[in-house]
Image (spheres, helix red, strand yellow):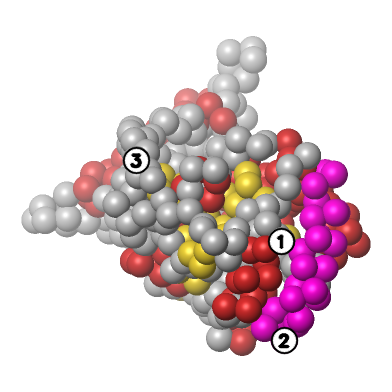
Amino acid sequence: MASIVASERIHRRLAIAVLGVALLVPGCGGPGPTASPEPPAATPSPSASVTTPFPSNTAAPSPTEPSPSDGSSPSPTGVASPTPLAYVVAPGDTLSSIARRFSTDIRSLSYWNRDRYPSLDPDSPDYDPNKIVVGWQLLVVPGVVLSDAEIPTPRPTTTPAPTLTIPPAPTPTGGTSLLISHGPRDSNAVALTLDMGGRLDPALDIMTWLVANDVPATIFPTGKIVSTTAVGKAVIERAAARPDLFSVGNHSWDHPNFTTLTPAQMVDQLERTEAVIEPITGRSTRPWFRPPYGAQNATVRTAVGGAGWSYTVMWDIDTIDWKPESDGGPTTDDIVAKVLSRVQGGSIVLMHLGGYHTLEALPRIVEGLRARGFVPVTLDRMFGR
């Protein structure tokens, strides 16, 4: 019986090997397999597009069969080896939902498909396991979960970090706040700026990612959100813990249109926010003021400049990430494409800590900036403060 089982196992492995060779040499004139393997018992619903075998030049993995500790041949289980399938991604699919459907996990799916789709390859600058596209054909081995030993540790990126160059930037004069929408164009610095005053999910996750990846940014909170929410306060505390990574500016107390306020009301908005943030960070929000809605004029700049906020910070790239897709807002791909297609030296990018797809977009934005020779910096660094 043991020899029969061993023979069957050898035949199964040979069948997989022959299938891999046939797929690797599609132009050969010899006949292919005479019969397609049977699909697993748990057949996906009719809406799923599944074919077998997988039509790719990627060899299908063969599950490892453990040997008994006593050295004898394993007992037959009566269960056939898992059959590789090609699953066509449908609208609404995520890598997680596909993994659940076929009783595997995201890491295994990513590893099996990394050669076909760079966004699933941890060694690729385009790596983003959250990005799959309708119509992709994914190799799936139902019921198989690869172990850590079977998935190599990703190699570190070989893309060298760009050397930062920042020429002198303009400085305010005459007591009026200087209106800026970008830094020096002959620089390779880019300022990522994140407002916080409304939606707070996923603010802490974004801060965690920035810290974990040493990505500098400038945070513009409203005083009210810091004063009244635990998340808002936690964001500023994390910024305070890494002054090398974060600058913190002033986005008003409760986000009014400054062009509708008196100069005294403007100053009150800024000073109330300062009184909440400075005790946490140990630093003033001066000189950075971001006007709510981008609403500003000469009267506004005179009032806030006189109170010490000598830069009125606008932007040259607006991701509109605060707007949900259901209202016509951007997808993750839209955000990434806008930033990388419009970036210039000295660009100031407007995002939000409560942006709907900001967390997913940031890794691809930062990698894309660095690949193009740009370096993320704080506004302090860009303007030599």
Can residue 271 be found in the magenta stretch?
A: yes
Q: Nearer the viewer, mark 2 or mark 1?
A: 1
- Foreground tag (3 vs 1): 1
Give the tally of numbered discs. Answer: 3
Residue closest to the far right: 228
- Mark sitting earlier along the chain (2/1): 2
The quarter of the picture where the C terminus appears is top right
Of the residues under marks 3 and 2, which one precedes in the sequence? 3
Which residue appears at 32% of the width and 56% of the height?
185
Q: Residue at label 2?
A: 260
- The residue mark sitting in front, 3 or 2, is 2
- Observer able to see residue 208: yes
Tell me which numbered mark, 3 or 1, is placed earlier along the sequence: 3
What is the number of the mark on residue 272? none
Q: Do tag 3 and tag 2 residues touch (Cβ < 8 Å)?
A: no
Q: Which sits in the foreground, 380 or 108?
A: 380
Residue at 56% over, 86% down:
328
- Mark 2: give few (<14), some (14-19) or many (20+) Cα within 10 Å: few
Prevailing secondary structure of the magenta residues: helix
The percent coordinates of residue 76 (x first, y second) are 60, 35
Residue 211 falls in image quadrant: top right
- Which region shows up in magenta? 257-280
Task: Look at the numbered discs 3 and 1 and tell me whether their residues touch, using CB distance below 8 Å.
Answer: no
Q: Quadrant of residue 282?
A: top right
Find the distance from the CA under tag 3 to the CA under tag 2: 40 Å
- Crowding around mark 3 (Cα neighbors within 10 Å: few <14, some 14 to 19, many 20+) is some
Instruction: Sort mark 1 into few (<14), some (14-19) or many (20+) by Cα contacts within 10 Å.
Output: many
Residue that numbered label 3 is attached to: 165
Rendered view: 354 above or below 298: above
Which residue occupies 76% across, 50% down?
A: 235
